[in-house]
Image (cartoon, rainbow, N blue to C red):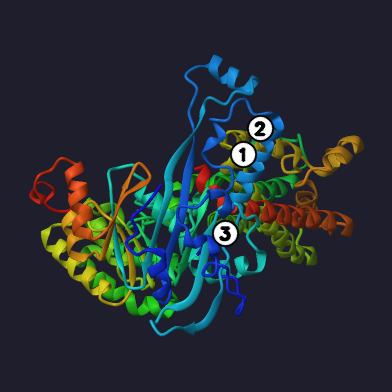
Amino acid sequence: MNVSLAVAPEAARTVPTPAIEVDGLSASYRIRLDAPDLRSDLRNLLTRRRDNVRIVPALRDVAFTMRRGAVLAVVGRNGAGKSTLLRVLCGILMPDAGRVVVRGRLNLLKPGIGMNEVLSGRENIRLGGLAAGLTEERLADLTDVIADFAQLDEYIDFPLRTYSTGMRMRLGFAVAAHLDPEILLIDEALTGGDAAFQAHVADRMAELCGQGRTIVLVTHGLSSVKRMATEALWLHQGQVAALGDPDDVTAQYMRYCRLESLDMLFDDQ
Amino acid sequence: MTGTPLSSPGAPTDAVSDPTWASPDGDPAVLGAAATLPEQKRPRPTRRDRRATRRDRRRAAGQAPKARQGDSTDESGYSDVEYVFEAGVSASTPLVPYVKSLWERRRFMLELARAGVRGKQASTILGRLWGVIDPLFQAGLYYLLFTIIRRGGRPQDFLHILIGGFFLFQLAMSAVNEGGRSIRGSKNFMLNSTFPRAVFPITAVCTAVMRFAPSVLVYAAFHIGLGAPTGPQLLLLPVLFAIQLVLMLGLALLVSTIVALFTDAGNAIQYLTRILFFTTPVIFPLDALPPAVYNALSWQPFFALFASYQTIFGGEVPGLGLLLQAALWAVAFLVIGTRVFLRRERELAMRL
């Protein structure tokens, strides 16, 4: 498949060192379907037919290059392969074909992953920081900063099971946004939280983007794509549908979604 | 982080100089692609084909990231780390850097294990007291069974042996159970984090040990209360416990991999634990075994360990042969468990 590269490979050579290079990347999931009845179970067991195993291609021949300091927004419908792309980028899933080169310390941020229900907000900050590989000293400095950022007041010392969905998201984002990797893969982190917190998030994101980090951002909030991204990638059914200028790509994606105006997808819904 | 950077400074990977990079839409075969999608499209593959395909997939999955790392950061402030994830390259995760990266996460595993212990007692009034009540109740139950129901049936001095052995056996089984399910049970974590996956089974073993800790006190109370023999042989208990830790770690790694790869194995664990329970010298005294049965059972991996425990609780020193046998089983399981886990680690996330 011919892909219009935002940065053509030839151009990439003149740039010192790209942070992320993805070439001919394909990845798939193997899904086992449960047989509807005992007879099918027996048939699957006795015969060598494996009609209950499906191989679902999640990414097909994806290629792009990101220079250091770029902010790439990945858009696309549910199930288009956005999260899979992030997982391959950080080595959680292995590609079936192609290769991925990542230069720099990287971190996948999926807010709220691994947060523990019985622990307090503060203890969860600690756990999240340790999971991301922060040192004890760094954590000691950061815990209060993160707690302040989350704006949870006295709830920060309550167990997580007492939190509302929005509060969880705030805590999750606060932790994720303060683990300072060089390459940041952010999966659906910007949604959730109330309007005040959204502004807070936007400020923090702008701050992160301004620090020379390379950021890959999976989001449904098209306005944040336009605001923050330097490049955008539209994934459709695992393939690159468009790649390039964020305004162009979102415009194409919107046209596909049959939406006339940005207002209808107003923000991060 | 899963993509453990290998320290091989001065050995840049071929990422930059890779000639195929110039053609992003090049033939996937050039890029060393393993079997991709056509597995289901291929018309009636022979058994040999299938085996080869599986092997290729395994290779693709078992590939370790090539990376180089130096201490320097370049002009842009980025550290000199490079991860290459590529299809069709075979290698299991190398041991030494892996253990190192696990060691770096020791605080994380400890916190995670603590949270696991607390989870069981969350929002209860008695809280941590449940950790003591539970073994106390079980020991009390056995006490009743022995002193009232089976009066005169078995020698009274077997009771503390039974209680001690039972606690230790329960510990081993929770390591197999919870360790075994740790990977499959952490799907969300597995798919959205990058630290070494062995964190999950190791943490499960830690949690089991932490939950076991109060049982030691309960046992000690019974040991003294029942007037069981004390002596220097008790000093061997920490050694045996260390052996048991190694055994549990190996089992957790091995079983968690198998359960992650074959869901069916998760259902089979309960049969395994039951078989182990009835073939391990916990509920029966060693000297009650006919020689033929003793010889047959002594091949069971848990036999030597728990026979040694029983001997020590009974006030004697176990033979060196028995101790060696216990240690050998433990080391064997750790080696096998580690090997299997490292070989399949990169495949695990895809099987969930």
Amino acid marked by disc 2: Ile
Marks 2 and 1 close (CB-CB < 8 Å): yes
Q: CA distance from mark 2 to mark 1?
A: 7 Å
- Output the chain of dot 1: B
Regarding residue B124, the answer to whether it shows in the image is: no
Q: Which mark is residue B295?
A: none
Residue depicted at x 17% and y 64%: A227
- Output the chain of dot 2: B
Q: Secondary structure at mark 3?
A: helix
Mark 3 or mark 1, earlier in chain: 1
Query: Which residue is under mark 2?
Result: B149
Q: Which mark is residue B213?
A: 3
Picture layout, residue B92 above or below residue A53: below
Mark 2 or mark 1, earlier in chain: 1
- Output the chain of dot 3: B
Regarding residue A172, the answer to whether it shows in the image is: yes
**Toward the viewer: A125 or B40?**
B40
Q: Which mark is residue B144?
A: 1
Q: Is disc 2 in the same subunit as disc 1?
A: yes
Task: Give residue B192's position: percent from left, percent from top.
Answer: 41, 54
Residue depicted at x 85% and y 42%: B287
Q: CA distance from mark 3 to mark 1?
A: 23 Å
Amino acid marked by disc 1: Leu
Marks 2 and 3 close (CB-CB < 8 Å): no
Task: Give residue A38's position: percent from left, percent from top.
Answer: 54, 16
Amino acid marked by disc 3: Ala
Q: Residue furthest top?
A: A39
Q: Is disc 3 in the same subunit as disc 1?
A: yes
**Toward the viewer: A19 or B291?**
A19
Residue depicted at x 43% and y 45%: A60
Task: Give residue B51's position: percent from left, percent from top.
Answer: 68, 37
